[in-house]
Image (spheres, helix red, strand yellow):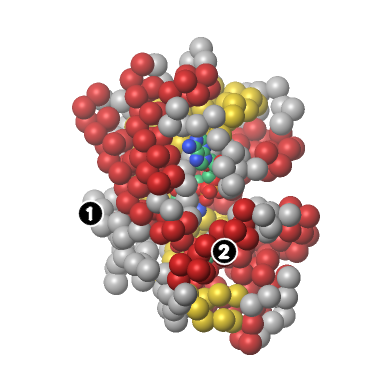
Amino acid sequence: MKILITGGAGFMGSTFIKYILKNHPDWQIVNLDKLTYAGNPENLKEVENCQNYEFVKGDIANRGDVEKAIGDGVDKIINYAAETHVDRSILEPDAFIKTDVFGTFTLLEAMRQHNVAQYIQISTDEVYGSIQNGLFTEASPFEPNSPYAASKASGDLLCRAYFKTYNLPIIVTHSCNFYGPNQYPEKLIPLFVTNLLEDKKVPVYGKGNQSREWIFTNDHCRAIELLAEKGQPGEVYNIGTGWCKENMEVTRFILAELGFGEEKIEFVKDRPGHDLRYALNSQKLKNLGWAHSLSWEEGMRRTISWYKENEDRWKKIKSGEYLEYYKRQYAERS
Ligand code: NAD
Ligand code: TYD
């Protein structure tokens, strides 16, 4: 089995590649990644010399790059590649449209030319917008509120159209927020943990009463592995754990684990268009046999420990382009 994984140098893509090479040593992996600020070859150092792993530097929005990665053919395509950070999409949406919309389109067009047995689109619960009470099902309407969510929703709609029109074997997943070791330190959990390890404050947007559902990396890998085996073409699958936490609860947990009090919290201006709550009904995935494997707290402790033990990995990231981004973000918001 040969699989093209796009965006495999990022947080979840690299975690999935390592998971697959460990658990399915007979699968061949080709990783197509543009190596944006979020893509880091160091994430794959331990597998870069594996015989069944190949890296292709390139853009999913460039047909030539996609053809090069497909080569003589692949059995499956799993599309992790995306621009992923909501705050960046508010500052500079262009790259989100190019990658999340046109990039998805380019991959789907390549699917039309090649005999690929399955395509999995890794997408997000943010396409549904915000829900005050209850849970989003796979039939909930798309009501995206950020340029990021709108770009992912657009890519997902193209997937739907390519299934309906061309009968291509496409699956779309809508996952809740990922957390775990090695996430780029711009997202809530790694930003707060690394700030505290640097003895800095943590910037809570607004009142911190927004709620997110969380899934640990390994459990997301297991969900995609299951869908690669049992997912049905044309179907959409929500991927969630039921662990819905307000941002203040997440913040207090991290503070307590690292031995700090609330004096380390800085309440800052809210994110424009900030979604209040995401929560998924994931029964369809559970019906295929998936269940999460550890508690939210255990996942948090493993995550925090990783950042404590791997300062060399994130300290060098928190400079250069990273600082430029924060300067732009705070200049815009103030
Ligand atoms: P990430 O930002 O850590 O990594 C994205 C990767 O995509 C990077 O390696 C980057 O270099 C690559 N990339 C970006 N543009 C590209 C292009 N044009 N061509 C090729 N490669 C390109 O992302 P992540 O947080 O690991 O998310 C992975 C996927 O999961 C995304 O599709 C995202 O929308 C989705 N998702 C993320 C979350 C979350 O909480 N992070 C939740 C649900 C769904
Ligand atoms: P984030 O990790 O950016 O994921 P998403 O917006 O895709 O869910 O943010 C998670 C939540 O944390 C979201 O409600 C915004 C909030 N947040 C803060 O309060 N402060 C921060 O510095 C960041 C990055 C996020």
Residue 104, quarter of the rendered image: top left
Query: Is 300 situated above or below 171?
Result: below
Kind of residue sitting beneath label 2: Tyr
Residue 137: horizontal and vertical position, in percent? 29, 55
Secondary structure at numbered mark 2:
helix
Distance from mark 1 CB to nearest ligand 1 atom below 8 Å = no
How many marks on residues? 2
Residue at position x 33%, y 20% in the image: 112
Residue at position x 22%, y 54% in the image: 141
Q: Which of 330 and 246 is in front in this view?
A: 330
Residue 311: horizontal and vertical position, in percent? 77, 59
The Cα atoms of the two marked residues, 2 and 1, are separated by 33 Å
Q: In this view, does 200 lie to the left or right of 178?
A: right
Q: Quadrant of the N terminus?
A: top right
Secondary structure at numbered mark 1:
loop
Query: Is 140 situated above or below 70?
Result: below
Q: Name the residue under label 2.
A: 326
Residue at position x 73%, y 75% in the image: 199
Q: Can residue 293 be seen in this view?
A: no
Residue 301, quarter of the rendered image: bottom right
Q: Mark 1 points at which residue?
A: 141
Front: mark 2 or 1? 2
Kind of residue sitting beneath label 1: Pro
Residue 289: horizontal and vertical position, in percent? 44, 46
Q: Nearer the viewer, residue 131 or 185?
A: 185
Q: Which of 5 and 138 is in front in this view?
A: 5
